[in-house]
Amino acid sequence: MTGSHPDPLDLLPEVLLAASAVLGLLLGAWLPRHRQWLIGVLAAAACAAGIVAAAVSAAGPEGTAFRGAFALDPVTATARIVVLGATLLVLVLTRSVLRGHAREAECYVLLQLAATGALALAGAQDLLLLAAGYLLAGVPGYALAGFLKDGPGTEAALKYYVVGAFLGVLLPTGVVLLLAAGGTTAYAELGTGLAGAPPALVAVGALAVLAGILFKAGGVPGHFWVPDVVQGSAVPVAAFLATVPKIGALAAAYRLAVVVSAGTEVPWTALIAVSAAASMTLGNLAAFFQRDVTRLLAYSTVSQVGYLLVPVAAVGESALARPALLYYLAAYAVTNIGAFAVVCALPGSRDLEDYRGLARRVPVLAGSLAVCLLGLVGTPPTAVFLAKLEMLGAALDGGLLWAAVVAAVNTVLSLFYYLRWIVPAFTGPPAEGPRHVSGSSTAVAAGAAVASVLLGVLGGPVLAWTSPAG
Amino acid sequence: MLTALVVLPVAVAALLMCVPRTAPRAVFPAVWIAAAAVELLITVMVWAGYRAEGGMQYEARARWIPSAGIGYHVGVDGLSLPLVALTCVLFLACALYATRQRRRVREFAALFLFLQTTCVGLFVALDLILFFLFFDLSIVGMYAVIAGWGQRGAARSALQFFLYTFVGSLALLLGFLGLYLAADPHTFDVTELTAANPLAERPGQGALVLSALALGLAVKTPTVPFHTWLPPAHTDAPAAGSAILAGVLLKMGTYGFLRIVLPVLPAAWREYAVVFVVVGVVSVVYGALVALAQSDFKRMIAYTSVTHMGYIVLALGAAGAVSVGSADAVRLAVDGAVFQMVSHGLLTGALFLLAGVLHERGRTYDMDAYSGLAARAPVFAALTGVAAFASLGLPGFSGFIAEFQILAGSLGPRPVATGVAVLGLLLTAGLFLRALQSVLMGPPRLPAGAPGATRPFRDIGGREALAIVPLLVLGVVLGLTPRFVLDVVEPASRGVLELLAR
């Protein structure tokens, strides 16, 4: 435990992002509308600087900040880099869609605040900070979902808010119960504190906290908002909400798992594994016959959370759990944003039918789509393949053979709906309809596709770094 | 050298995709043929420098993802070298054959070059994940070939093919993970796993891993009851695609058994070998019976592939009796299995290309629509006859050597099963003779309304001959002088059996 004295530099990425958000808010008040993109540039610069800062601090020793409330370890470092990188990509997408919008600046600010919340979730080593991160990641998200102020957006925001508020009540309840049981909110001492507590109290408390985290992650049973919010929001916002908060939430779930699985008798592994299996199966089955590509992607993210929860279930059972989770988070973020970027690049194309013959019209976009979707399936040599491999390895190593089989079967199921999207794009004559293609979104899609393959091929160093020493 | 062999086609494919589509049409096939020819040349050089008794050669290793136990490790031995050579020969034949391709030539050439990389890569891979990578990419590539260039209904067949083999590949992956976790330290390296024999002490886990691996490879092979994807995929694929699918891709399954399952899971294989004997025999007889009932020429060949692959599974199953004794006999069976892979690749490749010729002239594969082609197209008739007789295992052809070895080797350890499998020989002979009779003999007749009906049925053209004849010549050469291949195969199969006997 080094660095328990408060050192603001420990939180440099978070501070940069929050400062840039506040600055952006102030600037937005007096910048003319056609100059508001400067705030987006500022936000992007903050993200980029944050990535550098996170990488630099990742090379340093592990430790904690703010009296143990915030962890500085590979989990935080990975989450920082992935969250900031994903936010950076979303900022580019947002700019191509919302350029000149009356509230362009607000959108950038909200994105940054929500990303800061995700970072807080990821690093939280204290239940109170976890609750704060939950709110910070949530409230800007509600506003973002309804940002366009149209019918579907309003419905999305309302649904997101209602589900979030309900499960957001459960989370503090759980915090209180765990505090009562363990006598502290700091994870470091909670492990020993919970060991002697009544198991039922611990179980209910952990479940309530978990419910809040699963809402953020969009995993069963907290997944009800996902399809409507993703379909109703503006596409870049949907990409953000379907990716960034999940990263923070899954990192938080991992930290909670370490505490709960180490010191208590709560059947943590079975609990998470059931949620994982339900998430992947429900998400896949619901995605089967979707015609709207955003809704399809929404259900696909639910199923991906299921795969991501498998290593969380194996925490404490397998040393592969942490590298599997962290690598999968990075792989998932880049691949998922790539898929959303393809949708962004073709404004107005929301039906599967609109993608017919895409390969003839915009080959780059069709190629990126194929790489990203096959990547989400887990076809080698993309990043998600390696991630799934590690995930299955963690599951088998942790004695979760059935979860591994369920994941494998689900992978096959998922292939069906991804192919429903890919195949028409490569065969058949081009579809009628608007031909506008957004250049910057296309670049993001192509970049994400390339990054997904590169991350898969060059996964060695990443995995080596995320593996626990020894 | 092997790395060059693996990377060259995909590099050429990438270059081709950079050439604008508007470039002269002849450029793409020319580059494709040149690349395939260079591949064959490299293979010949590899073969020339290969020492039969030397074990694994031309090995190359590189660190790839060390923390996950994944490495880049390639090499050839007597099991893989013949298959690499077969792959290169068949791809060159397809390149020559497909010069008549008109539709999206550039993409077609690039896709086949990509497929060649996956096939060669799979046969030289000595790391399970590398193996799996090429395995999966070959599925993606073949899916694109069938869906993009197949006939009507191809999209459906392609999807069926993809889903089936993808399920198989995931079972395979679970099995690989089982091996990975069982080994200490965790590794995916085949040679290390082989040396470690990780599941020798844990029969329960061994059985689980074996069933996952066997399921994956059985789908790919394919054996009854996992063969149902094969006939539609073959029927709807373009001729060159069928030739590669049957000639090379099917071998991935049986090669996987020989390379991975037998050496790494010897105890489990010996324990459950009888299952594979039964599956093999059922595949032989069932495939032959269903083939007999076909009136579609291409479907018939597809089902005979199930039969021929069944012999290989039978031989490998019989090899599980190695501990009982009769080691020499069993070795003969394994030699025959490897030889059968090569022989079947050549002959079935030729048959599918001939089926493509038939379809191109008459626009249908229905055998009842044709009659008396021998009078119209003597060269076509002769080649088809040779291919059919070779495929049914007439002495003097490679198929005979292979099947003789398999049956003679399996007879000792598994007499009843082998006796039943001989029925498959008879049925295959019957169905090929019937097909030859109905298509080639009798009064000349062509499908009504087909483009070929109004003008004479064109005989084999120069380029078609260039593609098909060498395959058949190789089949005859291997049938008359099999030693140069067997010299390579025998030490390797002896090695597999030694590993199996542990």
Image (tube, rainbow, N blue to C red):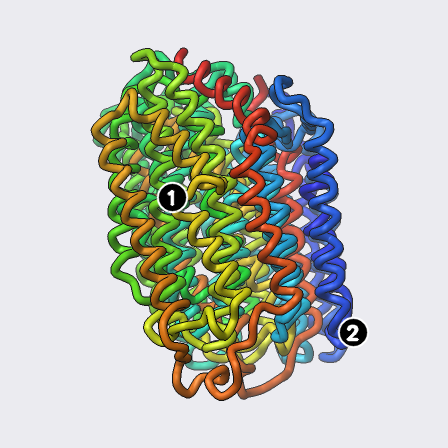
Horizontal placement of B340 versus A222: left or right?
right
Residue B148: x and y in percent read 52, 69
Query: How many marks are shown on the rendered structure?
Result: 2
Amino acid bearing label 2: Ala
Quickly name the residue at label 1: B308
Relative side of B443 to A457, left or right: left
In which chain is the residue bearing label 2? B
Residue placed most toward the observer, B106 or B85: B85
Q: Quadrant of the N terminus of chain A?
A: top right
Residue ID at (30%, 53%): B430
The earlier-in-sequence mark between 1 and 2 is: 2
Is residue B1 in sight in this rendering? yes
Residue A286 placed where, x, y %? Answer: 32, 62
Do badges 1 and 2 share one subunit?
Answer: yes
Going 77% across and 67% down the picture, which residue do you hit? B27
**What's the amino acid at mark 1?**
His
Name the residue nearer the viewer: A340 or B357: B357
Query: Quick check: B281 above or below B494?
Result: below
Callout 1: SS: helix
Query: Camera-side residue: B263 or B310?
Result: B310
Q: Position of residue A75 (x, y in %)?
A: 56, 35
Residue at 52 percent of width and 38 percent of height: B479
The disc at residue B23 is 2
Q: Secondary structure at mark 2?
A: loop
Distance (Cα) linking label 1 and label 2 = 43 Å
Observer able to see residue A140: no
Q: Nearer the viewer, mark 1 or mark 2?
A: 1
Residue B140 position (above or below residue B63): below
Q: Chain of mark 1?
A: B
Identify the residue at image location x=44%, y=43%.
A308
Q: From the viewer's perspective, is B400 left or right of A194?
A: right
